[in-house]
């Protein structure tokens, strides 16, 4: 705001105070307008951040549901692999079907949340809501790590066969493959439980339930 000198000379205290008052009122209006614009900008950032986070959580919920379905088939395959490997114990040259260690899992997204954090848009959200999103997105990192560990376990079990058929394994190799398969199965069971819990947590966040509300619903 620019402050201009009076158009006419000031001759009395009354004129002086009127001029000062005009300047003060103009400054207050300018400051108020600036704060209003800034507040509206913050509100826009807040609503945009919330919308992006909710869109991302909806996508993550769909990914979790697909991963849950795929875990059912994966665990069934690992159970079958263990049964077939146990049949080979002491009978290394018995002909059995091939073992399956396939996986088709998808990692979760968090770019929308990270973008909101980088632009400080999360700071404009109510504290409880911001904390709720922080808790929910911590599950993205945990779930992604469990998926990575499971894939490593599946590859370890597959590698124990060294690219050969089941009937070509020695008794020691059968034991090694069985142990690696059993470990992968335990990892798969843990991941399935985590996906079930995380699906409910996403649903709670999308519904606007704070973490304390979510904890109460699960007990």
Image (spheres, rainbow, N blue to C red):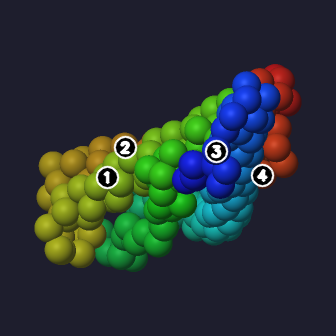
Of callouts 4 and 1, the N-terminal one: 1
- Residue 157 appearing in the image: no
Residue 14, by quadrant, is top right
Of callouts 1 and 2, the N-terminal one: 1
Q: Nearer the viewer, mark 3 or mark 4?
A: 3
Of callouts 1 and 3, the N-terminal one: 3
Residue designated by label 4 = 206
Q: Nearer the viewer, mark 1 or mark 3?
A: 3
In depth, the one of 79 and 122 nearer the eye is: 122
Residue designated by label 2 = 183
Figure quadrant of the C terminus: top right
Of callouts 3 and 4, the N-terminal one: 3
In depth, the one of 81 and 141 nearer the eye is: 141
Rendered image: mark on residue 105: none
Q: Position of residue 183 (x, y in %)?
A: 37, 43
Looking at the rendered structure, the number of numbered marks drawn on it comes to 4
Task: Find numbered disc 2 in the image and state the secondary structure of the residue it sits on.
Answer: helix
In depth, the one of 216 and 210 nearer the eye is: 210
Q: Nearer the viewer, mark 2 or mark 3?
A: 3
Residue designated by label 3 = 9
121 displayed left or right of 215: left
Question: Looking at the image, is 193 positioned above or below residue 151?
Answer: above
Q: Residues within 10 Å of mark 2 (few under 14, many from 20)?
A: some
Q: Residues within 10 Å of mark 3 (few under 14, many from 20)?
A: few
Circles 4 and 1, Cβ within 8 Å, touching? The answer is: no
Q: What is the C-alpha distance between the residues marked 4 and 2?
A: 35 Å
Q: Position of residue 56 (x, y in %)?
A: 62, 63
Q: Nearer the viewer, mark 1 or mark 2?
A: 1
Residue designated by label 1 = 153
Residue shown at the point (67%, 50%) measured from the top left: 8
Task: Find numbered disc 4 in the image and state the secondary structure of the residue it sits on.
Answer: helix
């Amino acid at each position: 705001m620019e402050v201009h000198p009076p158009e006419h000379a000031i001759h009395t205290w009354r004129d002086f105070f009127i001029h000062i008052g005009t300047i003060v009122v103009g400054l207050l209006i300018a400051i108020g307008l600036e704060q209003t614009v800034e507040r509206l900008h913050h509100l826009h950032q807040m609503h945009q951040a919330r919308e992006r986070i909710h869109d991302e959580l909806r996508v993550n919920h769909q990914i979790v549901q697909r991963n849950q379905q795929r875990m059912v088939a994966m665990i069934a395959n690992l159970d079958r692999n263990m049964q077939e490997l146990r049949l080979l114990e002491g009978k290394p040259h018995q002909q059995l079907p091939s073992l399956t260690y396939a996986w088709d899992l998808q990692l979760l997204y968090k770019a929308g949340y990270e973008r909101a954090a980088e632009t400080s848009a999360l700071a404009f959200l109510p504290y409880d809501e911001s904390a709720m999103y922080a808790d929910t997105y911590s599950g993205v990192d945990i779930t992604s790590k469990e998926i990575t560990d499971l894939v490593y376990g599946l590859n370890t079990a597959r590698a124990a066969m060294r690219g050969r058929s089941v009937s070509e394994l020695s008794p020691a190799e059968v034991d090694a493959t069985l142990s690696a398969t059993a470990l992968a199965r335990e990892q798969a069971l843990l991941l399935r439980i985590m996906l079930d819990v995380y699906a409910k947590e996403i649903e709670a966040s999308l519904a606007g339930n704070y973490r304390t509300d979510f904890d109460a619903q699960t007990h």
